[in-house]
Image: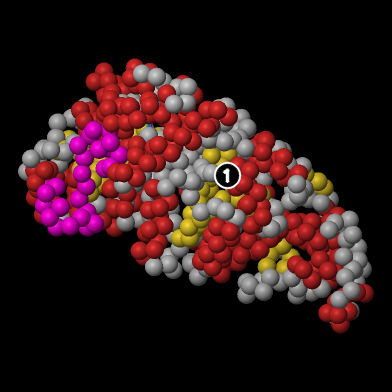
Amino acid sequence: MSQARHILKSTFGYDNFRHHQTDIIESIIHGQDVLTLMPTGGGKSICYQLPALIRPGTAIVVSPLIALMQDQVDALQQLGIKAAFLNSTLKAVEQRLIEKGFLAGSYDLLYLAPERLLNEYTLSIIDRCEISLFAIDEAHCVAQWGHDFRKEYQQLSMLHECYPNVPRIALTATADQRTRNEIIEQLALQQAHVFINSFDRPNIHYAINDLGNGRDALWQFIEHNHPEDAGIVYCLSRKSVEATAEWLNKKGRTALPYHAGLPQDFRQKNQQRFLRDDGLIIVATIAFGMGIDKPDVRFVAHMNLPKNIESYYQETGRAGRDGLPSNAWMNYGLKDVINLRLFTQNSDADELFKRMMLQKTDAMLGLCELTSCRRQAVLNYFGETLDEPCGNCDNCINPPETWDATIATQKILSCIYRTDERFGTQYIIDILLGKDDERIKANSHDQLTTFNIGHEHSGPEWRGIFRQLVAHGFLATDTEGYGVLKLTPKAWPLLKRSETPQTVMLRKLKKASKEKKKRVSTATRRTNQHLSTHDQDLFEQLRQLRSELAKDQNVPPYVIFPDKTLVEMAMNKPSNEEQMLAISGIGAVKFKRYGESFLTELKQHQ
Ligand code: ADP
Ligand code: ZN
């Protein structure tokens, strides 16, 4: 392990191992199989990259993400590590060259897609080479229960049969027990050492809002928290993706659209630009993101409700892989709640599956309407306990107020009952507010006892109450999608006042006004929060230099140095080689390549 520690410092530039890295690396070096579950950004790659440098032979890394292999290999080459990949994006001559290099034992690591690995030709080459280990990345792809099943992955069990003496390490960031068991079974990892990390992402700040106009709220959030940062904005439809991107561009940000309806090469180009340029926003449907390995995504914004907590956690998890403070921000409204419920009700899945989906919907809505710590709730959902409230989510920083909404609820329920459960939200609100309306008059609904009895709340406030009642299951909508409100069994006890008294506590609406500015900025956690104004300028200069160096070599900037390294440089202002090497993320090879350029830049700022 002393050799491993030495390489950690000299090659990767890090002083200490994180989490279970020590034990994982030790097991692999000694030839044992390993299954490791670590959240995104936890530091999985080093777990196989480092043993690959210590064990004799070439490490085969299996990954389904062909588009990422180039960047992964670029990053390794920047560290002075001999690595290559083989996939269909390469020309035939390039492939031959790499095969030759592989046969000659020139690589420490070789990246392959599973179908490439499994073809007979590749296997015949592998048979002739010394293999140090097999790393199976994104191992959850082997699980049918998981969200990203790939058939080829199941055949990877042959590795165990054909190469029993080569250690295997399976890695994933997927949490649940069932997927975990399936991985063990499918890949024959019964003998493997299993290392499970907490799934908490402490650097991500969670906020879920109900701020009315989504776009304005989004802009306020971006402007105040991330005026220059890279981020992802998720929208539900292709149309809203395009409209939102255009709108952000008008606001002065560079925002690129991404959805499955755009031409492949245009999509590809936008994704590439997002990875390679600093500070771009990508506006996308959930088609975007699988395998996006950009470490400095500073925010993920949801303009609608994700389908379930699994999706929410996966999508927000794309923020802050580098461990620096990042924001997961979401805004939603009544329509989202209705649509989500409808989507589940109308799915033509079998009953059992539908019941499961309904439970997941309930959990997601529960998370939105929650008044206590969001992180505790999410981790609890994944079977993990966080003892104390996190202090880094909206509810912790700004505890929501609740109020006794029993009377308001009864007014709504009674109004729906008296109008025979035939109308939608707006109509019911109009009755409660006593609106002078032809349709209401024609139906004689201005004669109801519930007409004009709701002036203690404004229209938007009533909408917020409706949303929460649907979310909490007091109201349902018709399955045809007309938005007609129905009473649920849960509503009846409230309607019949004779029953055991019951109170309904709801969240107070947040005001979508200037007050919000204050609220957002207290929650703000900028990447560079530790930097003074002067150091912030320096950081920007260093970022600029990094960007130029990256463009020259056509690699993403973070492959040269992560933001964290630049922040540390701006703070500590190293002025010689020794001080430079003390900065996290700078090893010998990186220093040799870039040390002088950065030292020169730093000198100019003294
Ligand atoms: P994952 O694959 O788990 O999402 P990565 O392997 O990409 O995460 O690691 C995330 C970041 O953390 C990378 O920038 C990596 O270099 C860094 N990292 C990994 N291990 C350490 C460590 N022991 N000390 C400091 N940084 C580390
Ligand atoms: Zn919290």
- The answer to whether residue 120 is left or right of residue 427 is left
Q: Is mark 1 on a helix, strand or loop?
A: loop
At label 1, the amino acid type is Pro
Q: Could you say where residue 364 lies in the image, as x and y percent from the top left?
A: 59, 52
- The answer to whether residue 370 is left or right of residue 577 is right
Labels in figure, total: 1
Residue nearer the viewer, 368 or 576: 576
- The answer to whether residue 401 is left or right of residue 563 is right
**Which residue is rendered at x = 22% and y = 57% of the image?**
88
Q: Could you say where residue 178 lies in the image, as x and y percent from the top left?
A: 41, 47
Check the picture and name the quadrant holding the N terminus. top left
Q: Is residue 82 magenta?
A: yes
Are there few (<14), some (14-19), or many (20+) residues within 10 Å of tag 1?
Answer: few
In the displayed structure, would residue 262 be above or below residue 84?
below
**Which residue is rendered at x = 23% and y = 34% of the image?**
81
Q: Is mark 1 within 8 Å of ligand 1?
A: no
Please tell me in which quarter of the rendered image ligand 1 is found.
Answer: top left
Residue nearer the viewer, 122 or 388: 122
Residue 119 visible here: yes
Q: Give the range drawn in magenta.
A: 71-99
**Which residue is rendered at x = 53% and y = 35% of the image?**
527
- Residue under numbered circle 1: 227
In the displayed structure, would residue 263 be above or below residue 27?
below
Q: In which quarter of the image is residue 270?
A: bottom left
